[in-house]
Image (tube, rainbow, N blue to C red):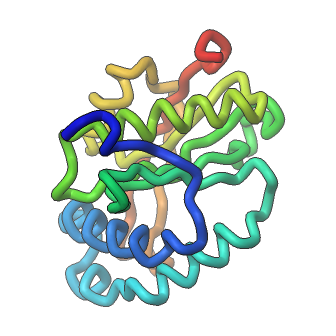
Amino acid sequence: MSSADVSARIAWAEDAPAMAAVQVRAWRASYADLLPAEVLDALDPEQIAEGWREALSRPVDARNRVLVALERNLVTGFLVTGPATDPDCDPVATGELGDLIVDPDKRGAGHGSRLLQAGADTLVADRFDRAVTWLPAGDDATRAFLTSSGWGPDGAHRTLDLLGDGTTTVKQVRLHTSLVDQG
């Protein structure tokens, strides 16, 4: 595949169904050990697509962006950027990568790297000096991918209650990187 056949761009509301399909496939592949099967089986692509349509049409902050990776005209992944939401981060200077999701059938083809670079470029354009992202503590593959791209742990960690009832929790670590020398 030539480099002209792959790209990354800002997502459009029309991308929402394709993004939802990628998200459902990726979550079912990546979270099978974290979430109960009935939760993963109940993921509704149409409902998720509606949420993406809303987020893309009416972002909460002008600096909230969603980027999509494309192979020809097929959405292969997406990345969310915006101001950091953690209380110990300055939302003016620190940006956040909220989601970095690549279709499980398209991993290893450079889509994640393209999204990560496009995300860093977007955060720099939005005048952020630093970026943070959260990932499950046991997600060694994503951690290796991010650390090979200049990210590192900053010591922050948290436990999320995924279902809200204490039965399904995930420990997360926060990684960070400087954006100053990327602009």
Compared with 147, 17 (above or below) is below
- Residue 22 lies left or right of residue 59; in this view the side is left
Say which quarter of the image contains residue 22: bottom left
Q: Residue at x 31, y 51 (%)?
A: 71
Q: Considering depth in this image, is 152 or 48 the residue closer to the camera?
A: 48
Residue 140, image x, y percentages: 24, 37
Say which quarter of the image contains residue 110: top left
Residue 120, image x, y percentages: 56, 31
- Residue 142 lies left or right of residue 8; in this view the side is left
Say which quarter of the image contains residue 177: top right
Compared with 144, 59 (above or below) is below
Q: Considering depth in this image, is 169 or 8 the residue closer to the camera?
A: 8
- Residue 97 lies left or right of residue 75; in this view the side is right
Q: Considering depth in this image, is 168 or 128 the residue closer to the camera?
A: 128
Q: Residue at x 62, y 20 (%)?
A: 179
> Which quadrant: the N terminus?
top left
Q: Considering depth in this image, is 179 or 105 the residue closer to the camera?
A: 105
Q: Residue at x 65, y 17 (%)?
A: 183
Asked whether residue 171 is in view, the answer is no
Asked whether residue 95 is in view, the answer is yes
Residue 17, image x, y percentages: 44, 78
Q: Residue at x 28, y 63 (%)?
A: 26
Residue found at the very far top of the displayed protein: 181
